Amino acid sequence: MSESELPDGVEGSLTLPWSAVGLSRNGRGVFVENSMHALTRSGMTQVATQNSLPTPAALGWSRLPAAYAIPATAPTLDEARKYCARLARSHYENFSVASWFLPKRLRQHFFNVYAYCRISDDLGDEVGDTAASLELLNQWQRELEACYQGSPKHPVFVALAETVRRFDIPQHEFSDLLAAFRQDQTVTRFETFHDVLGYCRYSANPVGHLVLYLCGYRDAERQQLSDFTCTALQLANFWQDVSVDYGKGRIYLPLEDLRRFGVTEENLARNQNTSEFGAMMRFEVERARDWFRQGLPLVGKVDRELAIDLDLFSRGGLEILNAIEKQGYAVLGNRPAISKTRKLALVGRAAVDKLFGGAGSKHDQTRSNGVAQ
């Protein structure tokens, strides 16, 4: 399989498409242009662009794609579905790759969930003003409540309402994500690793639950295993993006670990990959690998189609950790990335499993062993 034969989006980093992991990377392109044309044709009014007052909400919406704004009137269900599909398919991340492995009957529902996560994260991460982000997240929360009450206006929630009804998804799974994005506005340091895990509880784990709901799984055991995997992917993203996050004023490395290994915030600011920093990152990478190991049994407890996706993105997260290790843990000013060759190998393996049933045999064996391979 050549790179040109892969579904659109494979050039993005191999991060889990359903979680906050990887959702804080900006990229809009075709979606904005196409969505604006579609919304204009349907006569939907972008209320945010009408308000010329310098309110936090007006400021916030002005810094985001106009198509993100909450319209004055709700679109039709068909328009809402197309809106979510365009956002999911045109984004630079790996959603197009993931959706290729999903059952066709679930794709629209995954588009709907992804669209919610995508815009939610952008409201918190791409506005650049704390008060404006908090106000937009509050408006988004009210739209979520309207979704569950049967009166949403935003196309994401019009489409999502259908998904919520069909799969009986609890509202808190969506609200928890917004809690994490609100926290991002005021909490920029984490004293302990336990504090980091608490953040992952809201920023990453809920979307793993959403995926399980869409695939028919509601039990606590699978949710716990999903939490291990989603947290591990979040940690891998944090360790990959130490400099990127520091540029946004955030440090996700536990402060207790900086002190323990003799690393200072000035080292981060100056991109100083000292021996002490390398030792700390080695420790953090191994800790993330352990969380991946704890989540691996989930692959053997779901159907083959979901197992292929889980295996693909778990391996993608582990490859990020491998890339960090290969460059001697020197991530400051030098963001590690998975090579195109490795991406092709990972996606090619998943494609073979899908087309020829290899994953089914492997995961049948996994179930009997009780451990993912």
Image (cartoon, grey):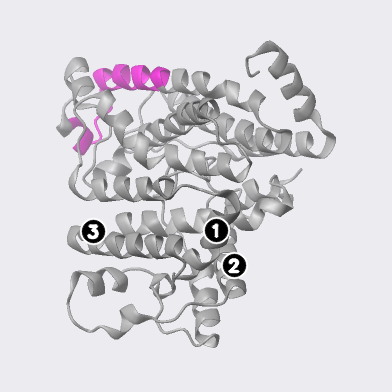
Q: Is residue 278 magenta?
A: yes
- Where residue 245 sits in the image (x, y, percent)? 29, 43
**Which element type, helix, strand or loop, lies under badge 1?**
helix
Total numbered labels placed on residues in the image: 3
Q: Amino acid at mark 1?
A: Asn
Range drawn in magenta = 267-287
Q: Amino acid at mark 3?
A: Leu
Image quadrant where one finds the C terminus: top right
**Which element type, helix, strand or loop, lies under badge 2?**
helix
Regarding residue 331, the answer to whether it shows in the image is yes
Does the residue at mark 2 contact the one at mark 1 (Cβ under 8 Å)?
Answer: yes
Mark 3 or mark 2: name the one nearer the start of the chain: 2
Mark 2 or mark 1: name the one nearer the start of the chain: 2
Q: Is residue 95 above or below residue 151?
A: above
Kindly identify which residue carries mark 2.
Answer: 81
Q: Is residue 141 above or below residue 94?
A: below
Q: Is residue 69 above or below residue 353?
A: below
Q: Residue furthest right?
A: 356
Residue 199 appears in which quarter of the rendering?
Answer: top left
- Majority secondary structure of the magenta segment? helix
Q: Is residue 209 magenta?
A: no
- The Cα atoms of the two marked residues, 3 and 1, are separated by 23 Å
Kindly identify which residue carries mark 1.
Answer: 112
- Where residue 114 sits in the image (x, y, percent)? 52, 54
**Which element type, helix, strand or loop, lies under badge 3?**
helix
Kindly identify which residue carries mark 3.
Answer: 134
Q: Nearer the viewer, residue 187 or 243?
A: 187
